[in-house]
Image: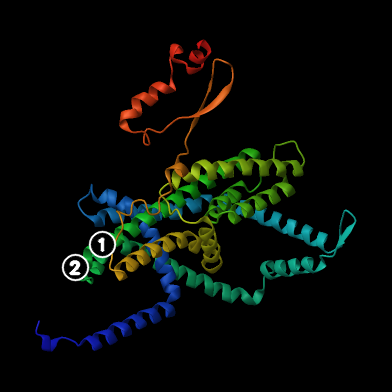
């Protein structure tokens, strides 16, 4: 191109900065729309593997998109419609039990509490609890029109999400290639590598979390049904959803379940409600620890392995600001920001853009995923001794056979016997 037709460097900077400010201002102005588009992109991302799988076995991607999209839509409408009557009754039971528990707690706090001769005046807490209950549960007739308007707007946003999901599924390869085309050729390979690393993070974390939520929800629903706890379906779904928030989520879930058990008891266990609630807490602690020590390391083995306190703080802040969606997305967003910041840092310092292939940056160490096992075996003198089984991954090839033989010594090669003979 003729240089006399090119923009000057100063003008290009002005246009670029102006365009960036305009994009940021638009995102801030249309933040509600951006939030719903993010939800649509997230849903499309979750079902995109099925589209990729089918597109390799069909003639066009459009056919695979239509098949997966409308099948998911049928499940989205059919499953809730089938479970709605049962789920509604379960919700009524849980809500009524929470109200009863709130009333009992408010009545208890309205009078001085005596513990070991000490008197605690908690009347203010009781009045605050009554105010909160009235604010959330007292229906106001003048709010009916506002409720109808909110419902209508929510339905329109739902339609936008549905259409956007289909758009993202069908046009994402073209959209991705178009975005890459804006990058200059010398840097395009770096951007594609950066995209691949971020994509691996999201695949590992989000799908692992969803699988973990489904397993926890199903297991606790079945457990509460077996124990005969009223509202088992709702309590199981709550336990699965609250798995997103470490420490705080399981605590809230067990408090709700224990409150229902304390008020309703069990449909078949012939014990008082207090003992039923105690059994429920014990069972919950056993299952949640099995999830934390065995299930989570297996499912989340290639998840974002970052500082646990940082992850907890980020999830709590995102839950307060954006709810469940924020809790689900904040950790992979944080990990993606770390990857991008590392790339920019190495570029600014004049280093190669990436260190290694990125396959171990956010991967849990092997001892977190599969702790070393120990084998107990009885010696000839009757004592028990723990001896670690060495992993073949840490033993050189030249010593594998020797180590295997030492794990199973023959009787005439027992060191203890040779020392006795000497």
- Mark whose residue sits in front, 1 or 2: 2
* Residue indicated by mark 1: 192
118, 99: nearer the viewer: 118
Disc nearer the start of the sequence (1/2): 2
Secondary structure of the residue carrying tag 1 is helix
For image coordinates 30% across by 62% down, the residue present is 194
For image coordinates 84% across by 65% down, the residue present is 121
How packed mark 2 is, by other alpha carbons closer than 10 Å (few <14, some 14-19, many 20 or more), is few
Instruction: Indicate the position of residue 150 as horizontal and vertical percent values.
Output: 53, 73
Secondary structure of the residue carrying tag 2 is helix
Question: Does 329 sit left or right of 339 as displayed?
Answer: right
Residue 340 higher or lower than 370, as above or below? below
Instruction: Indicate the position of residue 113 as horizontal and vertical percent values.
Output: 85, 59
Instruction: Indicate the position of residue 413 as horizontal and vertical percent values.
Output: 44, 15
Residue 124, quarter of the rendered image: bottom right
* Residue indicated by mark 2: 186
395, 25: nearer the viewer: 395
For image coordinates 31% across by 69% down, the residue present is 349
Question: Does 260 sit left or right of 320 as displayed?
Answer: right
Question: From mark 1 to mark 2, how far is it between C-alphas?
Answer: 12 Å
305, 325: nearer the viewer: 305
* Quadrant housing the N terminus: bottom left
């Amino acid at each position: 191109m003729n240089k006399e037709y090119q923009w000057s460097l100063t003008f290009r900077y002005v246009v670029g900065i102006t365009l960036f400010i305009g994009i940021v201002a638009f995102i801030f102005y249309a933040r509600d729309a951006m939030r719903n588009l993010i939800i649509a992109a997230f849903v499309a991302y979750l079902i995109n593997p099925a589209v990729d799988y089918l597109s390799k076995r069909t003639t066009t991607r459009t056919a695979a998109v239509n098949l997966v999209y409308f099948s998911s839509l049928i499940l989205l409408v059919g499953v809730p419609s089938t479970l709605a009557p049962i789920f509604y009754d379960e919700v009524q039971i849980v809500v009524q039990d929470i109200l009863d528990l709130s009333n009992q707690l408010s009545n208890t706090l309205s009078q001085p509490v005596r513990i070991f001769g000490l008197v605690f005046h908690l009347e203010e807490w009781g009045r605050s609890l009554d105010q909160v209950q009235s604010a959330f549960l007292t229906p106001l007739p003048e709010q009916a029109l506002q409720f109808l308007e909110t419902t209508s707007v929510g339905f329109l946003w739902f339609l936008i999400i549905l259409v956007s999901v289909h758009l993202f599924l069908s046009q994402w390869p073209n959209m991705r290639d178009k975005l890459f085309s804006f990058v200059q050729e010398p840097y395009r390979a770096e951007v594609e590598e950066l995209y691949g690393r971020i994509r691996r993070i999201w695949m590992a974390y989000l799908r692992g979390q969803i699988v973990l939520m489904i397993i926890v929800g199903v297991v606790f629903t079945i457990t509460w049904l077996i124990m005969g706890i009223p509202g088992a379906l709702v309590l199981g779904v709550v336990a699965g959803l609250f798995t997103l928030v470490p420490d705080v989520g399981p605590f809230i879930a067990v408090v709700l379940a224990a409150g229902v058990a304390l008020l309703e008891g069990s449909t078949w266990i012939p014990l008082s409600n207090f003992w039923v609630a105690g059994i429920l807490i014990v069972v919950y602690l056993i299952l949640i620890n099995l999830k934390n020590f065995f299930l989570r390391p297996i499912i989340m083995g290639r998840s974002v392995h970052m500082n646990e306190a940082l992850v907890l703080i980020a999830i709590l802040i995102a839950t307060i600001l954006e709810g469940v969606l924020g809790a689900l997305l904040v950790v992979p967003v944080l990990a993606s920001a770390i990857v991008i910041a590392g790339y920019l840092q190495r570029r600014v310092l004049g280093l190669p853009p990436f260190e290694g292939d990125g396959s171990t940056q956010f991967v849990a160490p092997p001892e977190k995923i599969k702790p070393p096992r120990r084998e107990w075996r009885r010696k000839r003198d009757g004592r028990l001794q723990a001896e670690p089984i060495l992993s073949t991954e840490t033993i050189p090839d030249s010593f594998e056979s020797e180590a295997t033989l030492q794990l199973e010594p023959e009787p005439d090669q027992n060191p203890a016997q040779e020392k006795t003979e000497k």
